[in-house]
Amino acid sequence: DINFVFIGVDANGNETELNRYTSGDIPSTSSSPTPWYQAYYSFTYSSNIEYTSYLLQVENNCTSTTGGDYAIDDIRVYRSKPSIQANQ
């Protein structure tokens, strides 16, 4: 159970949470090696603020304290421009 928090940072260093995604319970297994669990999501936001950088914050919601709860590999973030059609 992890959160992905996407944060925009403006020119003054102010941070704004743009989106939060929670994976929900990740299935546990006793098999070895443990199979990968793929978590992914997409979101859109509208803002008049220009952000100079972005942060991806990962939060662990697991209650276990007996070692590593998860491993993360191959994080990919894509930014796309909106599709605009103009007629004159």
Image (tube, rainbow, N blue to C red):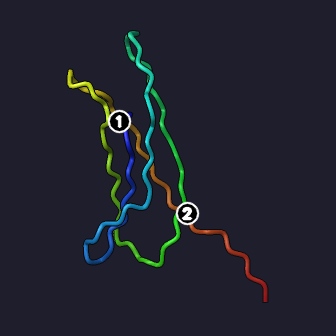
Q: Residue furthest top?
A: 31
Res 49 → quadrant: bottom left
In percent of the image, x 41 and y 19: which residue is there?
Answer: 28
Q: Residue furthest right?
A: 88
In percent of the image, x 40 and y 9: which residue is there?
Answer: 31
In percent of the image, x 78 and y 84: which residue is there?
Answer: 87
Q: Using a 10 Å C-alpha cutoff, classify the residue at mark 1 as few (fewer than 14 neighbours), some (14 to 19) or many (20 or more).
A: few
> Looking at the image, which is closer to me, 9 or 21?
21
Of the numbered discs 1 and 2, the one sitting upstream in the chain is: 1
Q: Residue 42 appears at what percent x and percent y? A: 54, 51
Above or below for 22 versus 27: below
Residue at the disc numbered 2 = 80
Q: Amino acid at mark 2?
A: Ser
Above or below for 86 versus 9: below
Above or below for 72 versus 11: above
Instruction: Give how far apart the Cα atoms at labels 1 and 2 are.
Output: 24 Å
